[in-house]
Image (tube, rainbow, N blue to C red):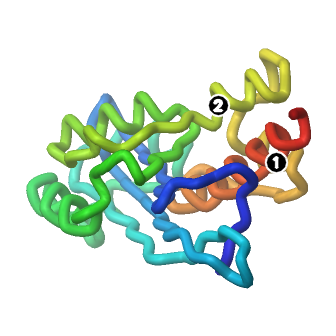
Amino acid sequence: MLLYIPNEKHKNLIFFDTEFNDRKLVQVSMIIYESIEVQDVHTYLLKGSINLYIQTPVNRFFTEYTGITSAFLDKNAIEEAEAKEILNEFLKGLNNDTTLLVAHGVKQDADLLTTLGVDISYMEKYCTYNAAKRLLDRDKNLRLIDVCNESGYFAEQHDAYSDAKNVVHAYSYLKLVEAMSK
């Protein structure tokens, strides 16, 4: 899949989301795009993705909100130490200022990754929530699903992998709104 994003010059874009329960990571999903030139147009090509579940107890509210159950985690989740190792390997060579880390609420999600021990300290960060508030000039209807729906992409949620895909659409839309307002 190719992306064209106006006025974007980073070498790599990482769209991601997390799901957490009581400040403990339960799910981490990332989608990486790498810049390429196609007929003299700066675009982005899908480079890879990852979707990890981390073993941690979850409460009823979390399960109702995400659909992720303790039974599912018992079968599919890995330990935190293994998740840290896998994520650091997945991001190897990307922790620099040519990589943009994008999320809807990037500070909270980035803090959770850092707490896990994932090194993202040199990546630039972009928050689609803050950008939506500024570019769409409003204080309401700023959820990720709202921004995606406004862009014409009718999003489903609430799972970190689905939301990481939704962040791709929200970011692309917001960068287009930004470019058109100049």
Using a 10 Å C-alpha cutoff, classify the residue at mark 1 as few (fewer than 14 neighbours), some (14 to 19) or many (20 or more): some
Q: Is residue 67 visible?
A: no
Q: Nearer the viewer, residue 45 or 128?
A: 45
Q: Nearer the viewer, residue 156 or 117?
A: 117
Point out residue 120 in the picture as x, y percentages from the top left corner: 28, 44
Q: Dot 1: what SS?
A: helix
Picture residue at 39% right of the left edge, 69% below the top: 50
Q: Amino acid at mark 1?
A: Leu
Q: Dot 2: what SS?
A: helix
Point out residue 16 in the picture as x, y percentages from the top left corner: 48, 52
With 71 as the anchor, is 138 left or right in this view?
Answer: right
Point out residue 51 in the picture as x, y percentages from the top left corner: 39, 66
Q: Amino acid at mark 2?
A: Tyr
Q: Is residue 18 visible?
A: yes
What quarter of the picture does the C terminus occupy? top right
Snapshot quadrant of residue 75: bottom left
Residue corresponding to mark 2: 129
With 26 as the anchor, is 179 left or right in this view?
Answer: right
Whether tag 2 and tag 1 are in contact, CB under 8 A, the answer is no
Q: Which mark is residue 116?
A: none
Picture residue at 79% right of the left edge, 28% below the top: 135
Marker count (numbered): 2
With 156 as the anchor, is 114 left or right in this view?
Answer: left
Point out residue 112 in the picture as x, y percentages from the top left corner: 30, 36
Q: Nearer the viewer, residue 54 or 31?
A: 31
Picture residue at 53% right of the left edge, 32% below the top: 105
Picture residue at 13% right of the left edge, 62% below the top: 85
Residue 115 to residue 50: above or below? above
What quarter of the picture does the N terminus occupy? bottom right
Residue corresponding to mark 1: 176
Task: Please report whichever mark, 2 or 1, sits nearer to the chain's N-terminal start.
Answer: 2
